[in-house]
Image (cartoon, grey):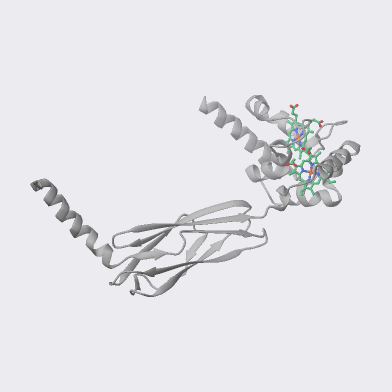
Amino acid sequence: MISRATFVLFTVFCLFSFPSLKAELIWEKEVAELEASHETRILILRFPFSNTGTDPVLITEIKTSCGCIEPMTPELPWTIVPGVTEELEVKVNIRGKKGAFQQTLEVLTFDKTTELGIKVEIEDPVHRTMTPEERNGNLAQSKADRRAIFKGNCIECHVKPTHKKYGMTLYESACGICHASEQRASVVPDLTEKIKNESKEYWREWITKGKEDGLMPGFAASEGGPLSGSQISTLVNHIARLKREQANEK
Ligand code: HEC
Ligand code: HEC
């Protein structure tokens, strides 16, 4: 015997699932994956889909995970008639982005939310793979002249990315390039403990002057480096903030 409770559940199930049987959007792909050059500013992606049911479906809203994504739909609600293939066109602004770029958008219909993914691998010329010969050659040049990183074709990766940068992004481009690299040479120290313990004066001194007879050049303009006084100040403040954050986490 079917119990009364089972019967009620079955009825409720039928009532709620029935509309989606008559109208359903099928997406040809739910994730768009591609590669892009670092000079690309705008990408246009397309998500083809169709309504495989017998009733029209209304797309009522599209939510995006960042302001960098702009769905280019007709005015909402967008009516998708049965048996027709449509394309959701999305404009993605990747200007200034590098490496793995991932975002999502949610397409809402009256009874369903479909999550679509965007995965772009953006070429990063500063962190491209270098051959061991190239890296050893660079290291040798720095050993001969610690200011070598500010000259010739070293500028592309060690100087240009620091232009007009301040604070955290300056730290990443000027310092992290060597100190935060997973594959850095053994002569490049890990700064984690120093960040926990050292003062602003310590940082200002190292950034300004580097190490005489060492590999690290001074970054201040007065030392032939690329950084202005105000850039150095924001760098020191950023490191001091990292120190405070770490102290608070304890
Ligand atoms: C080209 C690679 C390179 C870059 C870029 C670089 N450093 Fe260094 N840094 C070194 C090396 C190598 C040493 C080890 C000392 C030496 O031989 O010069 C060092 C040492 C240091 C030390 C001393 C750490 C210790 O354990 O004694 C500090 C502090 C430091 N760097 C901070 C910075 C900061 C801040 C920046 C960004 C402005 C920076 N470095 C950029 C290569 C680099
Ligand atoms: C394509 C970008 C690029 C160019 C060009 C480049 N570097 Fe680097 N450099 C890096 C990166 C990235 C690192 C961090 C280590 C790594 O990931 O290979 C690094 C690290 C270093 C280090 C620390 C030692 C090490 O290998 O970890 C020194 C010293 C250095 N570079 C000097 C130079 C000199 C001198 C030149 C020019 C002759 C130069 N670099 C050109 C990207 C570059």
Seen as rendered, the residue at the extreme front is 1
Q: Is residue 32 above or below residue 126?
A: below
Whether residue 74 is visible, yes or no, is no
Identify the residue at horizontal 36%, vertical 74% (top origin): 83
Q: Nearer the viewer, residue 48 or 93?
A: 48
Ligand 2 found in image quarter: top right
| 32 relative to 128 in the view: left or right | left
| 217 relative to 62 in the view: left or right | right
Identify the residue at horizontal 64%, vertical 63% (top origin): 40
Whether residue 121 is visible, yes or no, is yes
Q: Is residue 158 above or below residue 248?
A: below
| 85 relative to 168 in the view: left or right | left
| 147 relative to 200 in the view: left or right | right
- Residue 65: x, y in percent? 46, 54
- Residue 19: x, y in percent? 24, 64
- Residue 137: x, y in percent? 86, 42
- Residue 5: x, y in percent? 11, 46
Q: How many marks?
A: 0
Q: Which of the 4 image quarters holds residue 16? A: bottom left
Q: Which of the 4 image quarters holds residue 105? A: bottom left
Identify the residue at horizontal 35%, vertical 61% (top origin): 108
Q: Nearer the viewer, residue 247 or 64?
A: 64
Q: Is residue 50 above or below residue 175?
A: below
Identify the residue at horizontal 35%, vertical 72% (top origin): 80
